[in-house]
Amino acid sequence: MTSVISGQLLDQYERDGIVFPVKVFSAAEAGHFRAEIESVINDCGKGPLRRLDSLHLFFDWAYQLVTHEALLDAVEDLLGGDLLIDGTLVFYKPPHDSSYVSWHQDSVYSGWHLTPSSSAWIALTPSYQANGCMRVIPGSHKQGLLNHVNVRDDSNLVRRGERVEMVDESQAVDVVLQPGDISMHHSTIVHGSNPNASDEPRIGFIVRFVTNKIANRERPLLRVRGEADCSHLSLAEPPIATDRLKAFSAWRAFTGS
């Protein structure tokens, strides 16, 4: 197997807490997955959803995305060959939308900093400054967990409204990606994103990867590579519903979307 993230890219990941851009999907594949997500959003029929959780547990196309060989090869370079998914999330920002993501660390509530973990941010549209790309504070992952406050704001895509109390935004870097590119980031890197001020949507599909070393979770995890002992975990089965309406109904019941 040829390494996807090695050498200078691996050094960048350890130094900055993030590596990007890494080309994983073709433009055609990114376009296919984008169309599927937009179809789910349109099917909801109550205005565009900005946040879609756990699609990989119900839709065969989402399962195909998270188990894509090139994606798993990239993650294996960072975490090794025993990989599980501890959740997925789509952030959808329509054109000229006020939605944003406050400065935060993924691990503040998840505990991902206590175990080998990494998040893949997959661009299914161009992602750049004007349409609200992810922004990071390079090297902030080395500071450990920082103090957060929860501030209620309906425009914030982070559910609890958690945000780091003090951030030097002059150090921020825009994570600019093209469709099919990914970034990989540490669970303790400080990151967020601004509203979409452009004429096109911004869609990012986020996959949370862990190993079997993670402690027992309340939710099922999906094993995607390896055969390590996972007897302490609840493992999810790949989605079996090929009927789109059945998959959509099951997903809505599970997430309350």
Image (cartoon, helix red, strand yellow):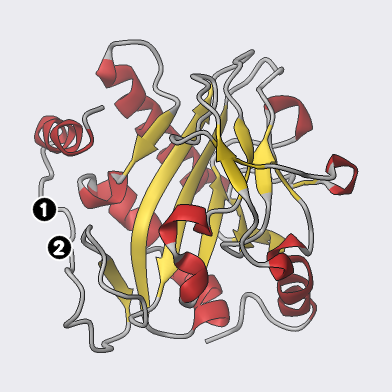
- On residue 39, the disc is none
Taking the view exactly as shown, the residue that stands out farthest to the right is 170
The residue lying at 53 percent from left, 54 percent from top is 106
**Residue type at numbered disc 1:** Ile
User: Pointer 2 and pointer 1: residues touching (CB < 8 Å)?
Assistant: yes
Q: Position of residue 124 (x, y in %)?
A: 54, 40
**Residue type at numbered disc 2:** Glu
Please indicate, yes or no, whether residue 13 appears anywhere in the rendered image.
yes
Element assignment for label 1: loop
Front residue of this view, candidates 230 and 159:
159
Please indicate, yes or no, whether residue 71 appears anywhere in the rendered image.
no
Q: Position of residue 44 (x, y in %)?
A: 27, 19
- Residue 156, placed above or below residue 82: above
Q: Position of residue 177 (x, y in %)?
A: 69, 46
The residue lying at 45 percent from left, 54 percent from top is 109
Front residue of this view, candidates 134 and 56:
134
- On residue 237, the disc is 2
The residue lying at 59 percent from left, 53 percent from top is 105
As measured in the structure, the alpha-carbon distance from the residue carrying label 2 to the one carrying label 1 is 8 Å
- Residue 125, placed above or below residue 143: above
How many labels, in total?
A: 2
Q: Residues within 10 Å of mark 2 (few under 14, many from 20)?
A: few
Q: Residues within 10 Å of mark 1 (few under 14, many from 20)?
A: few
Q: Which residue is mark 1?
A: 240
- In the visual, does 50 lie left or right of 155? left
The residue lying at 77 percent from left, 66 percent from top is 16
Front residue of this view, candidates 233 and 128:
233
Q: Position of residue 102 (x, y in %)?
A: 62, 35
